[in-house]
Image (cartoon, rainbow, N blue to C red):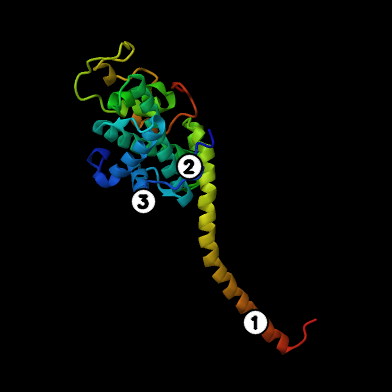
């Protein structure tokens, strides 16, 4: 019942426009805007990126499984990058991850703050009732 | 190499939903944290840029203004970690190459059908990879 990769529809590929944008951006950085890309090459770039995703995920997945965990985490990916010899990516990625975490922490903090405040209020109510009840020393 | 006029932090260009779908085509990959997904997306973009840069270098070497498939192939060949998992999967040039390059070390049109011993096939990583073994060994 599982479709093999060959039959995969476009939904399982990276958006062509984005691949093109990224590649062209890099090409213009390397060559003062002189260099362009052939259509066939672009397809190959897209496919290469897709294969890289598989390669990296599979490696990270193995690392995760070996550590007896169910969920692939950031550390697994960093280790996978080292293992696949793309360690030059690690530093820039760590910086990006920090920012990603900060952004998310902001969101989380907002949500959990509300919880905290509700809890606090509850406790305060309860304790104030106790006080009125009598002296506990 | 840290500061190239770019912020060190990046937002992934690739939609993470799509990246996740691609990852999950591998039945062994089940759950992925949002951080891990973020990192895979960013890594892929870095990889793409890396490939683009290398291919551009090859094109420039050959005094071309357009990066073509053969330039990409050459750049992949030149970088072992990439060649390991990618070379076999790259499409061959659609028509027989006129061999503008004098590089005889390039395998001929049918040479690519049989990967040389020691090369890992693309589906190798779907199975359990060896533990950091640069060359495949037969374990007793």
Q: Is residue B132 visible?
A: yes
Can you identify the residue that label 2 sits on? A65
Residue A97, placed above or below residue A38: below
Camera-side mark, 2 or 1? 1
Gap between marks 2 and 1 measured at Cα: 46 Å
Residue B44, placed above or below residue B102: below
Determine whether label 3 and label 1 are within 8 Å by CB: no
The residue at 54%/43% (across/down) is A94
Gap between marks 3 and 1 measured at Cα: 46 Å
Please tell me in which quadrant of the rendered image residue B69 appears.
top left
Tell which subunit mark 1 falls on: A
The residue at 48%/42% (across/down) is A65
Q: State the image coordinates of residue A107 (x, y, percent, origin top left).
A: 51, 61
Camera-side mark, 3 or 1? 3
Can you identify the residue that label 3 sits on? B17
Q: Secondary structure at mark 1?
A: helix
Q: State the image coordinates of residue A30 (x, y, percent, origin top left).
A: 40, 31
Callout 3: 10 Å neighbours few (<14), some, many (20+)? few
Q: State the image coordinates of residue B15 (x, y, percent, origin top left).
A: 36, 49
The residue at 72%/85% (across/down) is A131
A56 vs A16, nearest the viewer: A16
Q: Secondary structure at mark 3?
A: helix
């Amino acid at each position: 019942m599982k479709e093999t990769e060959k039959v995969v529809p476009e939904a399982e590929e990276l958006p062509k426009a984005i691949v093109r944008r990224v590649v062209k951006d890099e090409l213009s950085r390397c060559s003062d805007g002189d260099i362009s890309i052939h259509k066939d090459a672009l397809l190959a770039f897209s496919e290469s990126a897709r294969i890289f995703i598989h390669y990296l995920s599979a490696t990270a997945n193995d690392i995760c499984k070996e550590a007896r965990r169910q969920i692939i985490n950031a550390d697994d990916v960093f280790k996978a990058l080292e293992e696949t010899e793309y360690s030059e990516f690690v530093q820039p990625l760590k910086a990006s991850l920090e920012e990603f975490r900060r952004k998310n922490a902001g969101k989380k903090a907002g949500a959990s703050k509300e919880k905290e405040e509700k809890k606090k209020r509850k406790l305060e109510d309860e304790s104030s009732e106790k006080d009125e009840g009598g002296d506990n020393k | 190499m840290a500061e190239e006029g770019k912020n060190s932090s990046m937002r992934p260009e690739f939609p993470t939903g799509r990246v996740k779908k691609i990852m999950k085509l591998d039945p062994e990959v089940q759950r992925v944290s949002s951080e891990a997904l973020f990192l895979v997306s960013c890594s892929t973009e870095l990889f793409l840029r890396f490939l683009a840069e290398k291919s551009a270098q090859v094109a420039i070497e050959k005094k071309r203004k357009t990066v073509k498939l053969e330039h990409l192939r050459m750049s992949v060949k030149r970088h072992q970690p990439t060649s390991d998992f990618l070379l076999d999967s790259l499409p061959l040039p659609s028509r027989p190459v006129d061999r503008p390059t004098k590089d005889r070390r390039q395998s001929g049109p049918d040479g690519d059908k049989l990967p040389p011993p020691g090369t890992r096939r693309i589906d190798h990583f779907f199975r359990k990879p060896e533990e950091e073994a640069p060359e495949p060994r037969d374990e007793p």
